Image (spheres, rainbow, N blue to C red):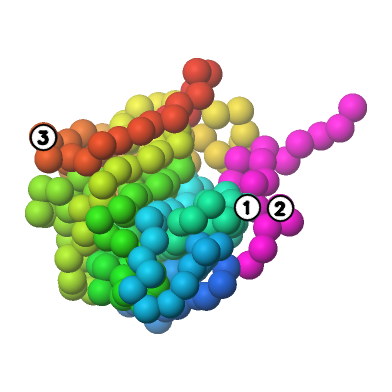
Amino acid sequence: IGTVNLASATFGLSGISAADPDETHVYTRTESGEDLTVDVYHAADAGTGSDQKPAVMQVHGGGWSEGDPRHTAAQNRELADNGYTVLGVTYELAEEGDPTWDRAQQHVTCAASWIADHAEDLQVDLDRFAYWGDSAGGNLALNTAYSAAQGTAESSCGGTAPVPGAVVTDYPGVDMEAIYEGDFPVEGMTGADFTRTYTGGSPSEYPERYEATSTERFISADAPATLIVEPTQDTLV
């Protein structure tokens, strides 16, 4: 009988034995001077010049306080091998006493606008562009895409985030209060642990922060086509 590290299995297992990205660029810096980056996985048949490819911006999960784009490096490379340009973005992670509920989504919006500004060099076809995120990254991908569609997306670096043709999310955290109340069988990884770190407190303490980060407030008739993949026994999100 073996044992499983559920934290690694949740946030890191899929990146095992994956190749490194082809390029990494700094798209902005945090107020504290931390580099925020875009990992680029070029399509296997990438050419030069105006040879633009369908593209995916990947937003990693990790409860808004952990994770890295390379945790899905295997999937990123597989998508690239099948003709996509894949762009894995980082954002400022929350820490105890330093919530990032008002910054992380602005960083993802900044990353999307940076990708749009460099679309030609990155071989990104903005007419065939999707956002993809898992867990906390699904929350950020949905909220960024839906607010971009409304014309209300706020970027930490200016610019305009492109409205994607589609959003694909795996077990996204869309209802912050439900996550706070959710169950997860790992000590130190309860829904309340994640949302408290991200928002700075509980729903009763900061109802406006929970509302501001829940996806419902961004839904509109202009929202792009959306695919949500959700496990049937997910007790967290």
Vertical order, 132 against 125 (above or below): above
| Residue positioned 17% across, 36% down in the render | 219
Does the CB distance between marks 2 and 1 fall below 8 Å?
Answer: yes
- 133, 123: nearer the viewer: 123
**Residue 25 located left or right of residue 141:** right
Give amino acid for label 3: Ala
Q: Which residues are magenta?
A: 1-20
Q: Percent x, y for residue 7?
A: 64, 43
Query: Which residue is label 3 attached to?
Result: 221
Quadrant including the C terminus: top left
Query: Which residue is label 1 attached to?
Result: 74
Query: Which residue is label 2 attached to?
Result: 16
**Residue 1 located left or right of residue 128:** right
Q: Secondary structure at mark 3?
A: loop
Marks 2 and 1: which is nearer the front?
1
| Residue positioned 38% across, 69% down in the render | 51
Q: Is residue 7 magenta?
A: yes
Q: Percent x, y for residue 96?
A: 45, 56
| Residue positioned 48% across, 48% down in the render | 61
Q: Earlier in the sequence, mark 2 or mark 1?
A: 2
Vertical order, 44 against 220 (above or below): below
Q: Percent x, y for residue 32?
A: 38, 78
